[in-house]
Image: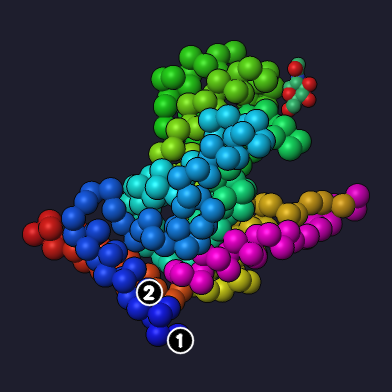
């Protein structure tokens, strides 16, 4: 490893331990890490430039907006495995195109969104779990069969979970509540294991998979997923985040004594 990279990564490690010790919003992910993983969103003008160019307003966020919600979500859903964090970050960064989007524009499926671009069925479940009272009011007569909800209902339900905290937590919720056979399993989502990430994408997220006319599953793979996963793991793997996640758990346990 080049000395400069080694020093950089050591600085991340030091920052993380420091952050764990000092702030309740902190956790295994630091702003410095996000800025290396997703450098465009480190620029303060990232969203202004994008909104001017694309005309999509109010969706784009900076890494500095994302870091605390991501750490809160990791704590909320008690994620401790490095491979799970990496997969979820890669999934979010791929689907949101590096934090540009929080709702689906292409093809424009109503009710599809959050930073993972969950489909309406999951957005509906997620909103119901987080905000049962508000959800009940908004879903109204479609509560028995949410697949029949009209576009304006879908939009109103989704609005409940598009805030930064919830939209950046959606992937961690999904992993623990909707694809729990991939959570805390020692042969799933192993650190730095691309095959496991593909397995999760196809069989957990159920993306890039379809069924042909004979009912046989067809798997494709968008290379952009690998690119994001590599960007995330380039930092996470080498920074030995695993030790630091463990460290943060230990420091929490210590505080309780
Ligand atoms: C609802 O949204 C979809 C896009 O998801 C669109 O194709 C459809 O025309 C819309 N329906 C109505 C009634 O506006």
The C terminus: image quadrant: bottom left
Q: In percent of the image, x 34 and y 68: which residue is there?
A: 12
Magenta range is: 213-236
Mark 1: C-beta under 8 Å from nearest atom of ligand 1: no
Rendered location of residue 63, percent (x, y)? 44, 49
Q: In percent of the image, x 40 and y 85: which residue is there?
A: 3
Please say whether residue 221 is one of the residues in the magenta stretch: yes
Question: Which label was assigned to residue 9?
Answer: 2
Q: In percent of the image, x 55 and y 20: which residue is there?
A: 156
Between 18 and 252, the one lying in front of the other is: 18
Q: Hey, which residue is sitting farthest right in the picture?
A: 213
Rendered location of residue 112, percent (x, y)? 63, 34
- Res 80 → quadrant: bottom left
Q: In percent of the image, x 45 and y 58: which residue is there?
A: 35
Question: Which label was assigned to residue 1?
Answer: 1
Left or right for 249, reference 118: left
Element at label 2:
helix
Rendered location of residue 209, percent (x, y)? 75, 54
């Amino acid at each position: 490893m080049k000395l400069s990279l080694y020093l950089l990564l050591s600085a991340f490690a030091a920052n993380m331990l420091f952050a764990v010790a000092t702030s309740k919003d902190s956790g295994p992910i630091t702003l410095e890490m996000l800025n290396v993983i997703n450098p465009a969103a480190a620029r303060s003008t990232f969203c202004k430039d994008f909104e001017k160019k694309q005309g999509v307003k109010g969706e784009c966020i900076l890494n500095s907006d994302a870091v605390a919600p991501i750490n809160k979500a990791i704590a909320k859903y008690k994620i401790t495995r490095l491979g799970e964090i990496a997969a979820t970050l890669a999934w979010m960064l791929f689907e949101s195109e590096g934090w540009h989007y929080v709702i689906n524009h292409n093809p424009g499926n109503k009710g599809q969104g959050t930073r993972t671009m969950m489909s309406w069925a999951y957005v509906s479940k997620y909103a119901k779990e987080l905000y049962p009272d508000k959800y009940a009011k908004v879903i109204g007569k479609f509560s028995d069969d949410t697949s029949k909800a009209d576009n304006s209902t879908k939009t109103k339900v989704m609005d409940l979970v598009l805030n930064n905290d919830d939209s950046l937590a959606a992937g961690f919720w999904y992993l623990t509540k909707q694809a729990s056979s991939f959570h805390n399993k020692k042969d799933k989502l192993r650190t730095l294991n691309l095959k496991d990430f593909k397995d999760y994408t196809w069989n957990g997220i159920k993306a890039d998979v379809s069924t042909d006319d004979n009912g046989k599953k067809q798997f494709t793979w968008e290379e952009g997923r690998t690119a994001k996963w590599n960007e995330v793991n380039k930092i996470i793997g080498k920074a030995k985040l695993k030790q630091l996640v463990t460290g943060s758990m230990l420091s929490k346990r210590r505080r309780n004594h």
